[in-house]
Image: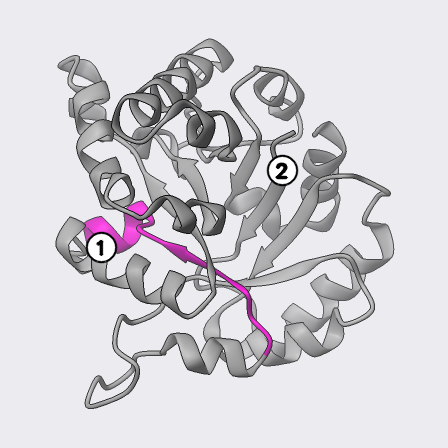
Amino acid sequence: MRSKIVAGNWKMNKTMAQTETLLGELAAKVPDTDAEVIVAPTFVNLAAAVNQLEASVIQVSAQNMHYAENGAFTGEISADMLLDIGIGTVILGHSERRSLFGEDSALLSKKVHTAIEKGLRVIFCFGEELEDRKSGNHFKVVEEQLKVVFDLPLASWKHIVLAYEPVWAIGTGETASPDQAQEMHAFIRKAITSSVNKEVADKVTILYGGSVKPNNAQEIFSKPDVDGGLIGGASLKCDDFMAIVKAL
């Protein structure tokens, strides 16, 4: 059985007070579920979130990290710093990191390797732009981005969660249809089978990330190769996020 996960990426939202309020609401309303429930607040609120959720089933993830252990990298955060405050998961490769901050596969490979060497679990994001989809290059683009994890040792795959995010469906209100999501998730497993092996392909959790909302979550999650979601805007509202958790 693959792990089922609903992860909320809060991006650059919520002050400390707002974070405490939302976490309190989530902890009070989280349903009894076999799925993992994860939230990823901003860096400055991570330690407080870990402390507040100590007695809750809700886990806390970071949104990013640097590949170096330490050094002259102003404004950056290392894996050791995350581990030191109780963080066990980090999101890497999000489309906004790629498009707005120029993160490419070479950089992401270093980040992924460092995270795994340190014992962090990685939610590795990838996905095509609208022009890739329109030109029919979406499978090729996704397979190219996945080469970052294809090169990992077999033992490292237990630290990997994949998150397919069609960039054209993030924050746009557009959503890949459930059939489009399933088609890509099935392709991803096929690509992993070819480049790694079938056992890894069958075991790895693949999340869908692209405007998942309470009204479409159940249909998307019903697809056989979709193991949950990486949720953006809807994770900032308690009732919406909990409805998505219940849908899984």
Q: For the residue marked with disc 2, what is the amino acid? A: Ser
The residue lying furthest to the top in this view is 179
Q: Which residue is drawn at 57% across and 81% down?
A: 85
User: Which is nearer the N-term, disc 2 or disc 1?
Assistant: 2
Q: Is residue 64 visible?
A: no
Q: Badge 2: how crowded within 10 Å, few (<14), some, or many (20+)? A: some
Residue 219 image label = none
230 versus 62 height, above or below? above
The stretch drawn in magenta includes residue 132: no
Q: Residue at x 72, y 64 (%)?
A: 23
Q: Badge 2 is on which residue?
A: 3
Q: Which of 233 and 154 is in front in this view?
A: 154
Q: Badge 1: how crowded within 10 Å, few (<14), some, or many (20+)? A: some
Boundaries of the magenta span: 86-100
Q: For the residue marked with disc 1, what is the amino acid? A: Ser
Task: Specify the quadrant of the image occupied by residue 116.
Answer: bottom left
Q: Where is residue 132 in the image (x, y as percent from the top left)?
A: 17, 23
**In screen coordinates, is 70 left or right of 144?**
right
